[in-house]
Image (cartoon, rainbow, N blue to C red):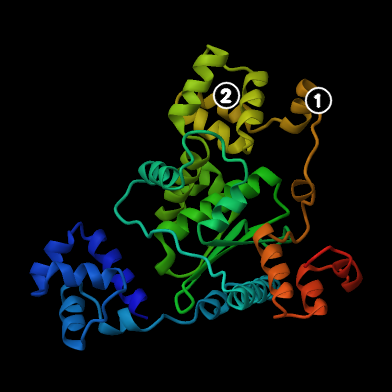
Amino acid sequence: MVRIVGTKIRKLREEMGLTQEDLAKSVGLSSEFISLLELGRRSPSLESLSRIAKFLDKEISFFILEKTESFDSLIQGDKLDAKTKRLLRKFRSDCEDYLQIEEMTGRQSDLAPLYANVIAEKLAEQERNRLDLGNDPIPNVFSLLELSGLHIIRRPIHEDIHIAGVFLFLEHKQAAFALINSNQPFHQQILTATHEYAHYLKDRYDGPIIDNPDIFIEDYITLYHGREKYAQTFALHFLLPPEKLKDFIDKDLRSKHLGVDDILYIRRHYDVSLLALIQMLKKIEYISLSQFKECQKWDWEQYETALFGSRKISAPQKARGHSLLSARFVSLVSDAYRLKKISAEKAAHLLRISKEKFLSFPLR
């Protein structure tokens, strides 16, 4: 609870453009106390919290009480049909399983920093620096995001349910989850997961977020909350650092006049969705608006295979349309079994395989 109070104070302070010294002076407290409070190392008295709340124009309850339990607020209301609510209840069960196994093994995720007042392009740069990624393509985005504290759940979502992804933050558990529609092409799943990661870095205390597939279409994204445009800009810059992309094109292709073969060659190098790539190429003015619209009509998988041949696709990529367990979750379940925290039956159930197959693994 102390950690939640401190995090909320810091988020509001930064949104107002105040330093810790500014806030301390305004509420009659020391900057050292504000610093320790935001780090979760000091618990505020009722009087000091009352001063801070009044200055930040919030009720005390905002800092000490969680809003409606996140899953309840996600599922409540008349806007969601029965099919969507069933999907979200399955998501809830997946999240609860994940949290339970983390607690059993003592391997709870550490949260990434919470950002405020940072433009999307700068946030992408700062996160790549924090994670020591440099400017090179990211080899395993899902694993990277999980190690940064965003639990990834990949489930197939029927086309009648217009959901690309869902972001959820459980304040009382200090745990973040993203549901990714595994019916999407693999590289689109990566783009969706990175989009949800932006919500995790910036919007985690603003309640659950359900993202419609339309948010990835430039003509439609302006119809949605401004945070969607922000998250999409972050995702593009995080996956495709523009300066490095320019450098790659200038040094290797040595031309700003890109043909179909050039664009597909770049896509293969960065291993991202064609949509993400052409959006960034348009942004850095390496393709025109008319080229961008033409690219959207391509059957690019057919073109790519014809030009470069097919390539071996790993099982997680091939398994589009299935529920996909993250490598970290599989590791946690195996660890819990080795520690004798769960039975072979329970482990097999969580891994969605038979008990016989699970016991055939050389686990120690």
Check disc 1: other Cα within 10 Å, few if <14, some if 14-19, many if 20+. Answer: few
Q: Which mark is residue 341?
A: none
Residue found farthest to the top: 254
Residue occupying the point 89% across, 65% down: 360
Residue 323 seen in the current view: yes
**Horizontal and vertical percent position of residue 32:** 16, 68
Q: Amino acid at mark 2?
A: Gln
**Mark 2, mark 1: which one is toward the viewer?**
1
> Which residue: 85% across, 63% down?
361
User: On the image, numbered disc 1 is attached to which residue?
Assistant: 309
Q: Looking at this view, is 112 or 272 the one in front?
A: 112
- Residue found at x 15% / y 73%: 55
Gap in angstroms between the C-alphas marked 2 and 1:
24 Å
Residue 43 horizontal side relative to residue 226, left or right: left
Q: Position of residue 162 (x, y in %)?
A: 64, 59
Quadrant of the frame with the C terminus: bottom right
Q: Earlier in the sequence, mark 2 or mark 1?
A: 2
Query: Looking at the picture, how far across and down is residue 247, in whole percent?
Result: 47, 21
